[in-house]
Amino acid sequence: MASVKDISVSAVINLISALVFLLAFAIARLQPINDRVYFPKWYLKGIRASPRSSGSYVNKFVNLDFTTYIRFLNWMPAALKMPEQELISHAGLDSAVYIRMYLLGLKIFVPITLLSFAVLVPVNWTCGETLHHIEDLTFSNIDKLSISNVPSGSKRLWAHVVMAYVYTLWTLYILYKEYKKISTMRLDFLASEKRRPDQFTVLVRNVPPDPDESVSKHVEHFFRVNHSDHYLTQQVVYNANKLAKLVEKKKSYHNWLTYYQTKNERNPEKKQKIKTGFWGLWGKSVDAIDYYTTEIEKLTKEEAEEREKVKSEPNAIVSAAFVSFNSRWGAAVCAQTQQSRNSTIWLTEWAPEPRDVYWDNLSIPYIQLSLRRLLMAVALFFLTFFFMIPIGFVQAFASIDGIRKVLPFLKPLIDMDFVKSFVQGFLPGIVLKIFLILLPMILMIMSKIEGFTSISSLDRRSAAKYHLFVIVNVFFGSIITGAAFEQLDRFLHQSPTEIPKTIGVTLPMKATFFITFIMVDGWAGIAAEILRLVPLIMFHIKNTFLVKTERDREEAMDPGSLNFSVSEPRLQLYFLLGLVYSVVTPILLPFIIIFFAFSYMVFRHQIINVYDQKYESGASFWPDVNRRILIGLVISHLLLIGLLSTKEASQSTPLLIVLTVLTMWFHKFCKGRFESVFVRFPLQDAVVKDTVERTTEPNFNLKEYLQDAYLHPVLKGVDFEVSKEINDEGKNSLVATKRTCRRSSKTVSNGTSEDQKTVSEIQLVF
Amino acid sequence: MASVKDISVSAVINLISALVFLLAFAIARLQPINDRVYFPKWYLKGIRASPRSSGSYVNKFVNLDFTTYIRFLNWMPAALKMPEQELISHAGLDSAVYIRMYLLGLKIFVPITLLSFAVLVPVNWTCGETLHHIEDLTFSNIDKLSISNVPSGSKRLWAHVVMAYVYTLWTLYILYKEYKKISTMRLDFLASEKRRPDQFTVLVRNVPPDPDESVSKHVEHFFRVNHSDHYLTQQVVYNANKLAKLVEKKKSYHNWLTYYQTKNERNPEKKQKIKTGFWGLWGKSVDAIDYYTTEIEKLTKEEAEEREKVKSEPNAIVSAAFVSFNSRWGAAVCAQTQQSRNSTIWLTEWAPEPRDVYWDNLSIPYIQLSLRRLLMAVALFFLTFFFMIPIGFVQAFASIDGIRKVLPFLKPLIDMDFVKSFVQGFLPGIVLKIFLILLPMILMIMSKIEGFTSISSLDRRSAAKYHLFVIVNVFFGSIITGAAFEQLDRFLHQSPTEIPKTIGVTLPMKATFFITFIMVDGWAGIAAEILRLVPLIMFHIKNTFLVKTERDREEAMDPGSLNFSVSEPRLQLYFLLGLVYSVVTPILLPFIIIFFAFSYMVFRHQIINVYDQKYESGASFWPDVNRRILIGLVISHLLLIGLLSTKEASQSTPLLIVLTVLTMWFHKFCKGRFESVFVRFPLQDAVVKDTVERTTEPNFNLKEYLQDAYLHPVLKGVDFEVSKEINDEGKNSLVATKRTCRRSSKTVSNGTSEDQKTVSEIQLVF
């Protein structure tokens, strides 16, 4: 086991690498040429102008004002300055609540750390002098601060039990306060929002087929009868998935065309050739510009046909619709009630905001949905516990012998010493790493198969899956050696009381590993996040080859967004580690606190200056966050029970079980107390907003406002010119929210580019 | 282990005792004097007149027409004759669906039995000739028909796995069909019902206190604002629990007064004395009639005071109210939506029908409710697993030594041989039996503490608790020896794969025990049920001492009702046994089929002729029934996995796990597909009923109709005379449903008795 000195060395190394990242960031962000990489949010908001337009030529690219370099860390206080209310209106509630998670970590762990260092560290330290003398060689300094230093059966273990109580109660108290605060924030956010289409709209799925009527008529009749005083209008859903793919393909061809045109301009002598086969590797060689021009023409024609088809053919309409009501009250009522006696048809739910809709999943029948969830649950189980089997298979194939056997012609190559050592040393690790990088995508695909209808819910479901994976494979996988399926097998053959013991015993020994993990993954990882290396490189590549107009440059920006489905479960690991080790090895806690504080600052900076969220769900992920922290708390109790029972203090087990039951009850209590705020819309609030609006704008034409709000984005900008016209006529400004309003008007002012992307992007934002 | 012969003997004994019960019933029911015990339902319906009024004096008491005795079993076809639709309108949907459970048992198990005898019995029988020769002495005949006869690792075990698949799929298919059928029955029942107050009413709990307004005004304002177009009226809830107790006490004193008056009339010389102390055992001896007359006078005064207090004092109003709407649509909407942003106040739910309301629980604050559920969950855990500890303690006290020590003056008594053997032999068993008799009451009290607001939900919750108790203590308790807490301890120290093995191995050996159990508890128990020995005796006692008028006689009838909270979990045990043993020991199945068929007949007879349900919940217990049968199915799979893995056929485990997962998924699917029918009221149906009613009765005064529907029953009949007046004026007939209408008009025609009971009973029925 590592000593304090080892840890210190590791800490210094990681601190230095973090500092290097920070320094690189501090310098890079001051260069005007990178301005769009580090401040895209402000560009999108239309507040920041391109710095290139002023100053000398060199000044456009490099910052030569050396005084600015002196204050290279001044982004930190700047990031902390913006008050929360402004942050919410600047970046949305999702982002504001997201960074509160880091704050929550600080609120929970700072007092716990102080208490631990005041109580548990002295208790552990002053213990077991004898042990220390005997096993001087194997005993590390870290262990002297942990529960390992307390001899079995010692009365001092009661201090740990008491502290477990204090920590749990404190955590529950903070969680309760936070849940309360965030549910108020959400309700205030919803109440303060301007009029939005989704406030009046309900998503109706599984519309039963009717032989005599079209879907559109059927939906209208149904809701006119059953919500007679409140029904306003409806929008059927077109199956435009194929069309969307065509549009996407055309856009990509457009990009390639621009790329080759740019190359051609710079070097007009050389003809640009490409091969038409698979990935441009095989096939006939043709002139690139000609090829893409004809391809785009073909696609344009195809697209027009498909567009016509979608609009005219009745079976292009799927069995779902967006039904709008004349008041928020009407929509809230329809979303919360059951419509038909068959509870698998006419399913209503509150519509996601238009840009949050996941269009592909709107028309899945109930039984199929139910089967898909079953299949994905089974798949998730196997993915979580047995993913090492295919990985191991690939790794075996990716070994020297495997390559020799399957690809004999590579034999001379891999027999070279350098290649050999690379293959042997790195390839298996790289295979695993590739899998882990692909994992969030796999999980997202699984969530999509499960049939959720909004991007926000897809994110939440993926996060749930990833959380399971992280707990099983990262947390337990690090504590117990062996692959997950081996653990599973072992656990199936051990008694329920034996399992926590097995893990509890190894727990203190793994503290140093997790400390190193926190420094590498946490500290250095977050510092890398702020540098944005990939977007930085991508921007400059695009800037060189694709950017012709100011609009193209705007497109080349990749502000990115908070990737909730990945970052939240990872963050949960830190909560779990903190809760588990708070009693066992308190020395781990300061490392977690630094992680939380540093991340808080970095992400606050990022959401202010960089990220552009794809949707706004109003912090509807909070119930998940709360639940997962409680899961961490329960795991910490169970492991502590196991640990203490190996230390001949099993009389504490009932006391700790009380704590576990209390935590579970707290979860149930919180669920009943707060969760409905995140899934339902209280009628009282709906009535207040309706009344205010009716008084202030008695003549507002709601029907016109809602008319095209829920049209598939591809169908909206029927064609480029038309879309521009609409923008010019200001028709759509009725639909647009504050931000999109700005963006669309900006688009118009930017003039006459013919690229499809911006329009579809803007429409996506609707 | 018992042989087929032993079982046959036991079967004959039990059949004979069942026949004796049936014969006694057949004779007793033909005696006119018992007519009110065996046909109370018809009296309550007002269809059957007292047989005493015609014929000679003797004929009034004893049936001398011997021809009727010949057809002494003709109640059986009579019970089966009534078509289901008529049954529903005669006895209500709850009863009709209840007996369908027995029918469901037949539907599931008859084909399974046939298949088992066609496939599994031959497979088992022709197996293991060698085994038979070796262990001839220990091997019973029953075992030759069970899976025990198949040697370990035999290929024949695949037959059992295949059969497990067939049986499971068949059970799921039947369950699906039944769930579908019953949800349709429920919806048709609700749709066909006449106007009822609960269709328009929502129970609002946790009304927040308001310093400026009374609860009544506050509720009215809130719903006038938030359901402006639909709110009609509201009825606050008075805390009349104390008053109800006074009324109850007065009624009991009245009975005693009548008793002593009757005695006095028959024997005017002897003065009736009673002692005023505890249970009439101690205290001053006074004249009974005088005593009760003055006590009743006192109580009447007290009651009047309390009544005034409840009506005038503002804090006699609890924070709950029944809010009524002008349409079913409005009520359905309010019941299904969230009203306030704080989801712990203004809780709305569909109001139970007036006679189903459990008045004591209407005003429990949310946090207290949540805590009560936690405490009761913990209490249930201890009750289920550790109930033997206090029982053992009492049993130890109830032993010879215990009595000698604590009550030394009884020493000469208990040293007598007869007493001694009684104490030693029976007392411990009696202590346990008393506990088991008290158990349903204890569970009901626990459910009441949990704070449910309707009697039907209390019944359902008690049933859930009892089901747990039965599974743990009867089913597993019989298979594994040792008290439940010992089992629990053992299971905690065994691996999850070991537990099913332990149980699976002992499973076939316990088959004979369960066959005997089915015969004693099932066959003979059901036969005893139809004889109604306790109500028979009670009726004759009451008839002798309390009955003066025809009305008194009506009261003396105790029709009883289906005790869902006890009988359903017991019935589930038979489903569990059938499912578990269908593959293991098929010989058990015919016994279960006889039980189901016989019970079906008996209960059909009982609900037609005897039982008078206290409430009508519209079969809302069905989701529970479905879930519990599926729990039985999952238990059967797990035990089969354990059994097969001890038979060296553990390669079948994954196949059976697939079956378990499928069953769990089926449960989820059914829940999504059907459950909402049992908890929510679809708007479509509400609109249809509203529209029909508005067209047929456009001028109906709904407000007047609903005015007093949800008044506490004690407050309704303000005083005796007043209540009678109301009946005379026919005011209440507006409120009354079909049945109560008849009853109340009958009450009026019965004239001028002054007893409180009937009125409060009628009001309870409202």
Image: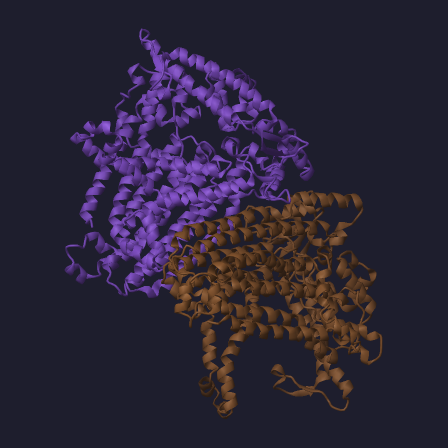
Chain colours: A brown, B purple
Residue at the extreme bottom of the image, as rendered: A412
Q: Position of residue B199 (x, y in %)?
A: 57, 35
Q: Is residue A194 visible?
A: yes
- Which residue shows up at 79% across the image and 58% down it? A733
- Which residue shows up at 43% across the image and 58% down it? B661
Image-based side of B67 in relation to B726, left or right: left
* As drawn, A539 above or below B131: below
Q: Position of residue A369 (x, y in %)?
A: 53, 58
Closer-to-camera residue (A526/A462) = A526
Image-based side of A134 in relation to A687, left or right: left
* As drawn, B207 above or below A679: above
- Which residue shows up at 28% across the image and 16% down it? B58
Q: Position of residue B423 (x, y in %)?
A: 22, 33
Image-based side of A87 in relation to A460, left or right: right
Residue at the extreme top of the image, as rendered: B269
Closer-to-camera residue (A514/A178) = A514
Q: Is residue A611 visible?
A: no
Q: Position of residue A422 (x, y in %)?
A: 52, 85
Closer-to-camera residue (A120/B690) = A120
- Which residue shows up at 25% across the image and 44% down it? B516
| Count of numbered marks | 0
Closer-to-camera residue (A589/A613) = A589
Image-based side of A87 in relation to A671, left or right: right
* As drawn, A699 above or below B314: below
